[in-house]
Image (tube, coloured by chain):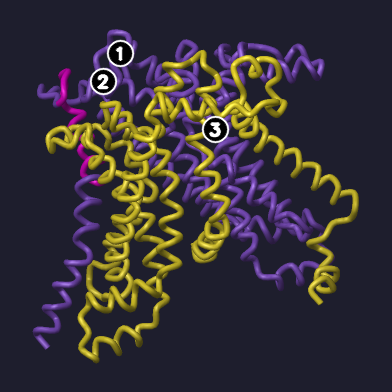
Amino acid sequence: MKSILLKERKYLQDNNTSKIILYIVLIIHTFVVLFPIYVMFVTSLKNEKEIFLSQVSFPKVLCWENYTDLFAKYNYLYYLRNSMFVTLSSVVLLLVISSFAAYVLAKYKFKLNKLIYFYFFIGIMIPIRLGTINIFQMMKSLNLFDNLLSLIIIYTTMSLPIGIFILTDFVRVIPDSIIEAARIDGSSEFWIYRSIVIPLIRPGLVTVAVFNFLPIWNDFWFGLVLIRSDKLKTVPLATTMFYGEYFNEYGLIFAALSMASLPLILFYLILSRQFVKGLIKGAVKG
Amino acid sequence: MIKRINSKVYYTLLFLLPGLIIYTVFMVYPLLDSLRLSLFKGAGLVPKEFVGLENYIRLFTQNPYRERFLNALLHSVIFFVVLYIFNILYGYILSIMVTRRHSGLMFFRVIYYIPRTLSVLVVGFLFSLMLNPVFGIFDKIFLFLGMDFMVRPWLGDPKTALVLIGMITSWHHLGVPILFFTASIDGIPEELYDAANVDGVNTLGMVRHIITPLLKPMIRLVTVLTFVADFVAFDIVYAMATSRGNPDYATDLTGTFFYRTAFGAVYGARPDMGLGAAVAFILLIIIIVGVLLIFYIFKERDNKL
């Protein structure tokens, strides 16, 4: 049935020549996308000798030493742990704070509601980086300079506008009657938030978490400005350090680059459905 | 009744305040504080000497500040043009291709977003290594293909470095426009194609008369996001050409210029927070005006159609 429908809709089909051209273009672009990542990964598995023999080929002998060195010699676990801690804390804080605000902005009627929504909305377009000087001074005076807490605060803040924007849309869809009924039953507002709103906007929470995870994990700018000590470095800071200090040890550098990338690629591939689904919802409205 | 209203006010504040406070204290206030800070001068953590508009005057009239600042501004404009061509135009064409009705196209859509999951920094290091003559994988491929003229120090040449870094940034970023465009092409109702099909409109006509007008809000959004990201771009240049924008400031962008003036104590120049704040405030104005302008341009076109 479905195939018949597709055949009738000729306008989204192409004749054979254009179909071939289309696939050729798409395959060439796939190659452009995957080739550098492939090179990074295979090089990380070669020993120093083989790296310079042929860069494109797959390693003849898998050399895991580059990776074991990262962990055993260079404390890579520290950096991973720092990034994990900072990213997870920021995302959890972000979800709590933005869902609080989203509930009020979507369901409470009061004078300033629209204005506050707009106030948050502007933050999607203005880059927080331009306030870095003041943030740097503030963190120094709060004694949070060179402290992972400063990163958590900034990452939560920078993701807040988009988080509130997405979640307010999700809360708006909840019928008012459900919330009114609970109020008449004498439920407290906090109970409504926790037991009605949160379960119903779960897909929205996942979308916000997935969207903000990557930029937070990959952020380099605020780490560069706010972190000094080696043992507090996040993965992007550590990657820079490896690149700068072990410039001639190609295997090690490529292993560091791969370690900074492969977990995220896997994370994305597992959740790619969620990415697209969450975005379509937002796109259709916006 | 009174109790009811009170409890509502109480909960409004309770739920809204954490977000409002954090957002105001750590984002809005720092952004606006640049204006105050830019009126002060002095090395060290907090510039104390009030100098009025001197920092702005320095930026616009005194060398080397003027030269470097205008240089960085020009480069950011060029960078935006490169990103526009390789992200928005090329991304638009690819998006239309992957939303046709053939088997296996979903595979391409998933693949094309992968570079975006890497950090910009990793992308910069990775391409630097592949371009350098020692590891030199690109050189070897060009030699293998018999294209010897392509073997050149692309990153070392001031004429090509900026455009090349722009193209590499596009390699990293392209997944975003594609994701946004394909999502909204998917949302176009079938009936619209049906109607056009009855009128005998061909594929290019569909793109021109149906898809493009309907995607206008999305194209506008991607243009705004690209524009804003362009003026604070930093990581890629830092990774490939250091915060000085090597060679000879040929890849210096406003983002790297801002970093150097405010934080970077490179080559004897001491970080000058007052001057850096002036740069930040000018960039903030440029971004606000630019975003409004983009909205205005897209509105104009709407009226014409």
Nearer to us in this view, B304 or B285: B285
User: 10 Å neighbourhood of mark 1: few (<14), some, or many (≥20)?
Assistant: few
Chain under callout 1: B
First along the sequence among labels 3 and 1: 1
The subunit letter for the residue under badge 2 reads B
Q: CA distance from mark 2 to mark 3?
A: 33 Å
Q: Magenta segment: does it hold B279? A: no
Q: How packed is label 2: few (under 14 Cα within 10 Å), some, or many (20 or more)?
A: few
Name which residue type carries label 3.
Answer: Thr
State the hue of chain B: purple
Residue at the image point whose x is 52% and y is 16% from the top: A249
Looking at marks 2 and 1 on the same chain, the residue that comes earlier in the sequence is marked by 2
Relative to A243, is B141 on the left or the right?
Answer: right
Per the rendered image, the range of residues in magenta is: B27-45
* x 64%, y 42%: residue: B89
Q: Pointers 2 and 1 in contact (CB under 8 A)? A: yes
In the rendered image, which quarter is residue B34 located in?
Answer: top left
Asked if residue B234 can be seen in this view, the reply is: no
Query: Residue under circle 3?
Result: B169
Q: Is residue B68 left or right of residue B298?
A: left
**Residue B62: assigned label:** 1
Label 3 environment density (alpha carbons within 10 Å; few <14, some 14–19, many ≥20): many
The residue to which callout 2 is attached is B57
